[in-house]
Image (cartoon, rainbow, N blue to C red):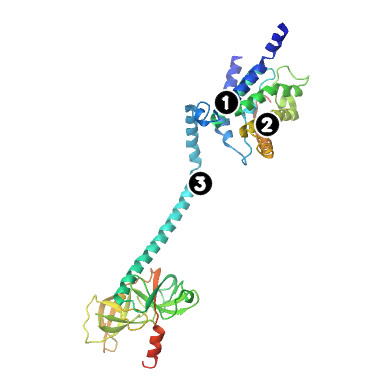
Amino acid sequence: MRSILDILIKHNHWFLFLLLEGISFVLIVCFNNYQKATMFTSANSIAGNIYSAITDVDSYFGLKTENRTLVDHNNELINEVESLKARLREYEDSASIASIGNARNNDGFYYKTARVVNSSINKVDNYITLDKGIMQGVDNQMGVFNSKGVIGVTFTSSDNFTVVLPLLNSKSIISCKVNDNTLCTLKWDGKDIRHSYLIDLPRYELFEMGDTVYTSGFSSIFPAGIPLGRIEKLEDSADGQSYRARVELFVDFADIDNVFVVGHSNREEQEKLEEGIY
Amino acid sequence: MTSKTLIRTRNFVLLALAQVIIFSQIHLFGYATACIFAIFLLKLPRHTTQNEMIIWGFLFGIVTDMFCNTPGIHSAAATAMAFSRKYILAAFTHKGLPDDFIPGVKSLKWGGYLVYAIICVSIFYAVLFPLEVFAVRHFTTLLISTAGSTALTMLFVVVAEFFSPNR
């Protein structure tokens, strides 16, 4: 008996070991349910406070990546805003198309949207390139305009691109009218991108400064009534036979993005009919 | 004796903080997690009583558990390691050593100390990981975790040995 006790006392660390292992296993089995584990987990206040301090420091180290993420996100949002703006502009433009269409009773004209992919404004003969071509139904001899006014006439098309002859080209001649009845022609002098000239204005007609110039609608390129600009100054033509008017153009050619292309479904028929006569 | 206990308590607090704040947060490649409080248990003098050893091990385990949300797991493993240390150390003890030596490079040489440390640390992880998954999940995963964590811990054991004042 004595010797058994001696052995037990001598090996008391075994009991301590088994006791502590037992406690550990009880903890494992009973407290792995988090709700019961507040005492021995990070939910208690000491561990919680230390952890919040760690997190504060840790978040400081994360600032660089955080910043990067924010910049990226910002960039994404800017792009989104831009694309939404572009779409809004498109819708606004289609709204104005709709009003034009209604006014014109929409006889035979159809519209396409396009984007400007390239343009020049600093030459005597400027051109604009659009991102739509024959495949998208954009061909030569179609009118191009945006929400502000007329831009030009398509000139040549490839499968997916179209070159436009804008008002800012010495070869561009647009038939237009002032005061609903006076026919005249708009021609650029190659100098100022904000202004163009109405030539061959008959002397018997009366014009006022600020009268708006519209497309005539007599060619099958543009429907009638799309604005071009406003008369700013009347002067004599070089030969003195007629008037010449300086027109302030509505379209800012330095800033065009989305445009509309208007075509006429019966243009070829009309041209064929007129061919032998004019 | 009292000053020794004070120093030990200070070391305990510092190592425990380092463990829960830094080392328990690092999971290298998803497998290896270092356990630096093992250094404290490895470096206790040879004649530390088994009871004291076991209690130190249990305390380290329970503190780590508190912070890692693993009640009982670290304490079971650390207690097992503390308990078995005496028997492992006995295998490396030879006659030329003073009676109450501190295990280290100075007393056991590099080879002896490293093997002793590797065995102790592997025991710790060999208990820890099976308890953690509480099932023989993937035997190979357990093996990789144990080997990886042991290697990582050994790295710190070696580094600590270089900075140890009485190696």
User: Quick one: A270 or B158, which is closer to the camera?
Assistant: A270
Residue A192, position as x, y percentages in the image: 35, 75
Mark 2 and mark 3: Cα distance apart in space: 37 Å
The residue tagged 3 is A65
Residue A250 vs B84, above or below: the answer is below
Depicted A180 relative to depicted B35: above or below: below
* Residue B18 placement, left or right of A48: right
Which residue is disc 1 drawn over?
Answer: A27
User: Which of the 4 image quarters holds residue B71?
Assistant: top right
- Residue pointed to by mark 2: B126
Q: Amino acid at mark 3?
A: Thr
Q: Is residue B66 above or below residue B140?
A: above
Under circle 3, the secondary element is helix
Q: Position of residue B114 (x, y in %)?
A: 72, 30
Tags 2 and 1 touching, CB below 8 Å? no
Q: Amino acid at mark 1?
A: Leu
Quarter-wise, where is residue A227 in the image?
A: bottom left
